[in-house]
Amino acid sequence: MRAIVIQPDHRSVEVVDIQDRADLVRLIGHPTLESDALGDAGDRLFFDEACFLRGASGRFQIETLVPVAGTAVILGVDGDALRDAASDVDDLRRRIRYL
């Protein structure tokens, strides 16, 4: 499925293909996932729940969402099922503020 990976330490936003939740955990680097709703299309921003406690490098914020440290991944969600991210990558790049 289509996922969008944000790596604030590199200031990069890239589309990748993942298969399942295990790939999501691998990309983020920790199994303690948290997520925030992102837009009206059902996308969510997934990140490490303990990102600030772990001292993850690189921080960013998308508009008024809570700031995040470390790698984050955007995926679509339908109930408990993950699906392709609907967010536009170029639009996301304009909305991200690196801290």
Image (cartoon, rainbow, N blue to C red):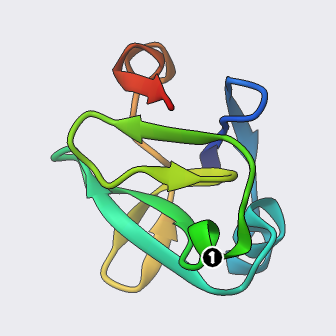
Task: Say left or right for 4 vs 60.
Answer: right
Extreme residue toward the left, this view: 40
82 versus 43 height, above or below: below
- Residue at image coords 16%, 47%: 40
- Where residue 5 appears, as percent x and y from the top left, is 66, 42
96 versus 38 height, above or below: above
Quadrant occupied by the N terminus: bottom right
- Where residue 55 appears, as percent x and y from the top left, is 71, 64
Q: Which residue is mark 1?
A: 53
Q: How many marks?
A: 1
53 versus 72 height, above or below: below
Dot 1 alpha-carbon crowd within 10 angstroms: few under 14, some 14 to 19, many 20 or more: few
Classify mark 1: helix, strand or loop.
helix
- Residue at image coords 79%, 60%: 27
Residue type, mark 1 in image: Leu
> Foreground residue, 33 or 16?
33
- Residue at image coords 41%, 50%: 67
Task: Say left or right for 53 vs 38.
Answer: right
- Where residue 7 appears, as percent x and y from the top left, is 71, 38
